[in-house]
Amino acid sequence: MISIIVSCILNGLLLGLIYSLMATGVTFIYGIMKVSNFAHGEFYMIGAYASYFTVTLLKVPTILTIPVSILAGFILGYTIERFLISDTYKKKIERPGEYAMLTTLGLSILLQNIVREYYSPFMKSTPPLIAGTVPFYLTSISLDRIIASIISVVTLALLYLVIGKTKLGRSWRAAAQNKIGALVTGVNIEKACHLSYGVGGLLAALAGCLLAPIYGIFPTMGYWPLTISFVAMTLGGLGSLEGSLIGGIIIGLAHAFTANLVGSSYADIGMYVILIIIILFKPTGLFGRRD
Amino acid sequence: MMRPKAKFLLPQNLYSYYTKQTQKTVKVFRMNAKIISSKTALTKMQAIILAVIVVVAAVVGVAIYYLTLPTPVEPIKIGVLTPLSAPADFTAGSLIRKTAEIFVEYQNDKGGVLGRPLELVVADQTLDAGTAISNLVRMVTSDKIVGLIGPWESLVALPVAEATEDYPVIMFCTFSWADNITANKYKYVFRLGVANRLVSKGTIEYVKYMGYTRAACICEESSYGIGMWENMVKWRDETYPELEMFQILTPPGKTDYSPELMQIATMDPPPDVIIMNNNLPHVNIMNKQLYEMGIFPDIPMVSSTSHPLWDPDSFWEAVGEAGIGLIFQDFDSPFAEYTDVGKEFQEIWDEKVGGVPTVWLAWYWDCLRILVKAIEDTGSTDPDVLKDYIEDIEMVGTTGDIYFINDPTPGSIFWHQWTGFNYYFFRLEAIGDTTEHQVYPPVT
C-alpha cells in the first residue's frame, strides 16, 4: 500500500505541474481581461502543429521548434484579440462576457474542423525533446515530462517577474484592476489587452509544443487541456497564477489517488468532487479575490 | 375588201376592257366548278365516317408500331446507402459504392438477373440517422429497391436497420459492429461480417492460445469499450474460465492516462497480458504512455482492433518505437487463402480499381451475390420471399462458406448472423510493419 501511495504522490505531482502548464495561458488571459477563452485548447493545438510542421519541413530537433510554436501562438492570440475580442472592452456590445465566450467557442470548433478537413484526422507526433526515460519508483518516466514540469515552474516565475517588474506588467495590472482608471492615467489599454491575449496564446502554444511528444497531435487534442485549465483556474481562483499552479497540482494528485485507490472510472469524479468542496467553502477559489 | 381599221384603245379603256374579260372568265370558271361539285360532293354523314376511319386507322397504326417495338425491361434496383461525406467515413463509403458499381457491371455483362438489368440507387448515409432513414424511405417507396447494402457506422446502421421493419427491404451489413444490429432480430437485416461479441471471442481465443492467465483489460468508457469488456467476460466464462481479468476503465477524450495505467504497474503479481479496447487516437496515446512508463513491451499488449492498419504511416509517425511489439487483431491476412470466387473478385478489383481490396469489400461482393442468387432462385423480388430464402442459403463466398445462423433466442446476436470469418493476430516487429508477422493462427 505504501508503494502505491508513494507512486501516486510522485505521479500526481508531476502530472499536476503539466496541468499547471496547460492552465497558465487561460488563467493569464482571464486575470487581465476578465474574459473566458474557450479557444485555449486550439491555441495549444496550433502550438503543437507548428512544432510538428517545423520538425517535418526543416528536419530540426523538436526543442528548436519552441520559438516557432510560441510565435504562432502569440500571433494567433494577438490577431484574435485585435479583431474579435477587443469589442468587449470598448463598450460596443451589450454583454461582453457572453460575446467573448461564444466567439471563442465558435472559433474553437472552426479551428478543429479546419485542421481535420484540410490536414488529417489522424494522430501525429514530434520526436522527444530529449529521448530517454528515468526510473521512477514503480514505473519509469520520460525526460520530456520532467522538462515540461520544469518549464512549467520557470514560466510561472518569469510571468511573475514580467508582471511585477516591467512597465508592460504594470499596464497589465492596471488594466486588470480598473480599465477606465488605467486609461485616465495614460495606460494604452488596447495595446495591453492585445499583448495579454497574445501572451496567453503563446503560453498555450508553448504547452502544446512541449507536450506534443508525450500526448501526440490531433485536431481535438485541445479538449482535455481546456477542461483541465478551467478546473485548475476555478479551483485555484479565477485569474490567479499561483492558484493555477496549486490547482493543477491538486488535480494531478486527485487523479492519481482516485484512479489507484478508488477506481480508474472515478478519476475525473475525484477532481470534480474536490472542486465542488473548495467552491462550497471558498467560492472565489483558493487564491481568488472578490472584485 | 378593205381591212377593218384597227381599233386603238386609250389606256383607261384598256383597263375596263381587261376587267370585263377577267370577270367573264371567273364567271365561267365558277359555273364549271358548280357543275363538278354537284356531281362529286360528300354528304355530311359520309364526311364524318371518313374522318372516323382516318382517326381509327391512325390510332391502330401507331399502336401496331409501338406494340411491335422491343419491350423496355424494368431494371432490378439495388440501394447503396453508405457514407459519402464527412464526418462519416466517406473513404469506406466510396469503396463500397465502387464495389457495387463493379458488381452491377459484372452481373449485367452476364445478362443481369432474370433477364433484367441491375441498376444502382446511391444515397449518402451521412452520420445523421434521420437523413439516412429519409433516404432509405425514398429508396424503398419511390425507387423500389429490392436490396440494400452500405450502412457503415453502427450509430446510423442500427436506426436504418430498425426502419426496414416499416419499409421492408433486404439489408446487409458487414463492418457495423453493434451487437444489436442482429440481436434486435430485425426481419430483413443480415450481417455478413463482424460483431462486437465475435471480436471479443477472437481476443479470448488468442489469450487462451498463448496460455496467459492474468489479463489487464483497458476499456474505453463507451458503449464500445464496455460492450467489449462484457463480451470478453462472457467468452471467458464459456471458453477459458482459468483467465483472471482486471478492468481498467479510461474516459475517452483525455490525453494523459498515466494515473489509470499506473494500476498495471502496481498489480501484484503483474498481469501476463494487457488487452486494449480503445479507439483512435487514445489507443495510440496509451500505447506511448505504457511504453514510456516501462510497462510495455515487458508485458505483451494486444489491441482488439486493427488500428495500425487504418493509416499505417500515421500510426508509426504517432507511436514510433512504442509500437514495436504490439499485437493486433484483424479479419484478413496476406497468408489467408481466398476461394475461387474471392480470387475472381480480387482480379476484377485489381483490373478496375487497382490493388488489393479489403476483406469487408469482399464481403460486400458476397452480399450482392447472395441477393442476386436469391432473386434468381426464387424468381421474386418480394422481401419476405427473399428473406426466407437467404435465411437458409448455402453458397461459397469470397473468404469461405456463406450461411446464416438464425437463433430466435431473445438477445442472441446469432440472428441472420454469419460466423464464417477468421481471426488473425499480427505482431509489429519493426517500424513500418503491418501484417508481415502473423502470430495466430500460426503460419505453416
Image: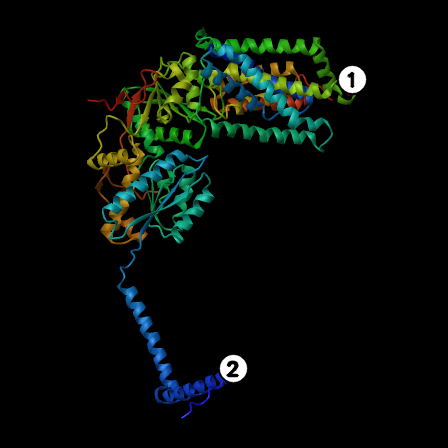
Q: Which residue is mark 1?
A: A186
Which-is-in-front pick, marks 1 and 2? 2
Q: Place residue B286 in its image quadrant.
A: top left
Above or below for B73 versus B5: above
CA separation in Å, label 1 and label 2 = 114 Å
The residue sitting at 42% across, 50% down in the picture is: B138
The residue sitting at 35% across, 86% down in the picture is: B40
Q: Which residue is mark 2?
A: B15
What's under tag 2, amino acid-wise?
Answer: Tyr
Q: Is residue A22 magenta?
A: no
> Dot 2 lies on which element?
helix
As drawn, the residue found furthest toward the right would be A184
| Closer to the camera in the image, A226 or B51 | B51
- Give neighbour class at mark 1: few <14, some 14-19, many 20+ (Cα, 10 Å): few
Which stretch is magenta?
A: A181-186
Q: How is the image coloured?
A: rainbow
Q: Position of residue B66 (x, y in %)?
A: 30, 64
Q: Position of residue A252 (x, y in %)?
A: 54, 16
> Quadrant location of the C terminus of chain A?
top right
Q: Place residue A33 in its image quadrant.
A: top right
What's under tag 1, amino acid-wise?
Answer: Gly
> Dot 1 lies on which element?
loop
The residue sitting at 56% across, 22% down in the picture is: A43
On the same chain, marks 1 and 2? The answer is no
Above or below for B199 versus A32: below
* Chain hosting mark 1: A
